[in-house]
Image (spheres, helix red, strand yellow):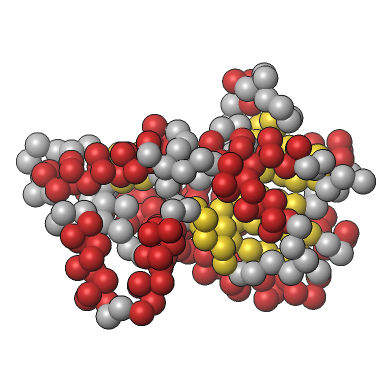
Amino acid sequence: MSKVVLITGGSSGIGKSVGEFLQTKGYKVYGTSRNPQNYPKSQFPIIALDVTQPETIKDCVATVLKDASKIDVLINNAGAGITGPVEEIPDAEIKRNFETNFFGPINVIKAVLPTMRSQNSGLIINVTSIAGYMGLPYRGVYSATKGALELITEAFRMELKGFNVEMTNVAPGDFATNIAAGRYHAPVLKDSPYKEKYGEALKTMNDHVDDGSDPKQMAEAIYKIIETKKPKIHYKVGAFMQKFSIVLKRILPDKVYEKILMKHYDM
């Protein structure tokens, strides 16, 4: 039988590219969206799911199991961007971003694990971000959510070893998707002490996404991971300098690396 793959956030961007690519390789793919009715022409089924609403997670997993009887691969791709000076981002928006990028994926994992244990097999791929390896100015909350998901995956992997369930992270750099349009942007306030620098940084961040790589690179990388018998703990996908920035953080003194980031953001 074909492997069954569930992709959260599979209606657009990286999730859509991954789903379409995996279909060409013979996988049975299910995607999710908060509004599946908006994607009637999707090449694979789109099921209603909001990762911040546990009941929709439960219903989505039940729908896939009813139709396919198993879930071989979960790709936790759904997520949301957020920008702004940490001081000025409303607490409610910080909490909402953690609900989407951290607690949401954990709850989807919890929902599929009983099935994967009963199958004595399964693979969970958490889509994080290269931004999760460093605290980026004006993206601090986003970095924190993705960094938290990276770390908890390390713990989860060890806890799952006895059940033949594998888990890994894939950290993308900037890809040409619509993530910028869906971000929460803290407004550039007229009387803000961050007004000038944040305004400039916001433009830089949006330009990086617009000039990002083809999401098909992520699709090809995830396909290789699925086909790997024993996946690594961490993968990075993106432009060379974005991946190299993680290496620099490991080898450079903290303050030197901080100066490099500040120069990049013209701070």
Identify which residue is drawn at 64% across, 69% down.
232
- Total marks drawn? 0
Question: Measuring 54% from the left and 41% from the top, which residue is drawn there?
Answer: 215
Q: Farthest residue to the front: give it.
A: 240
Above or below — where is 176 with respect to 35? below
Residue in the image at 20% along x and 61% along y: 262
Residue at image position (57%, 47%) is 217
Q: Is residue 110 visible?
A: no
Relative placement, left or right, of 126 versus 259 is right
Q: Position of residue 151 (x, y in %)?
A: 52, 69
The x, y position of residue 155, in whole percent, is: 60, 73
Q: On the rendered image, what quadrant is the C terminus found in?
A: bottom left
Question: From where the camera sits, is residue 30 visible?
Answer: yes
**Going by the image, does 146 lie left or right of 231?**
left
Residue 77 position within the rendered picture, expressed as x and y whole percent measured from the top left: 58, 47
Which residue is nearer to you in this view: 126 or 176? 176
At which x and y percent is residue 173? 44, 52
Vertical order, 200 against 153 (above or below): above
Residue 118 appears left or right of 198:
right
In front here: 244 or 172? 244
Q: Is residue 41 above or below residue 1?
A: above
Splitting the image into 4 quarters, where does residue 46 fall? top right
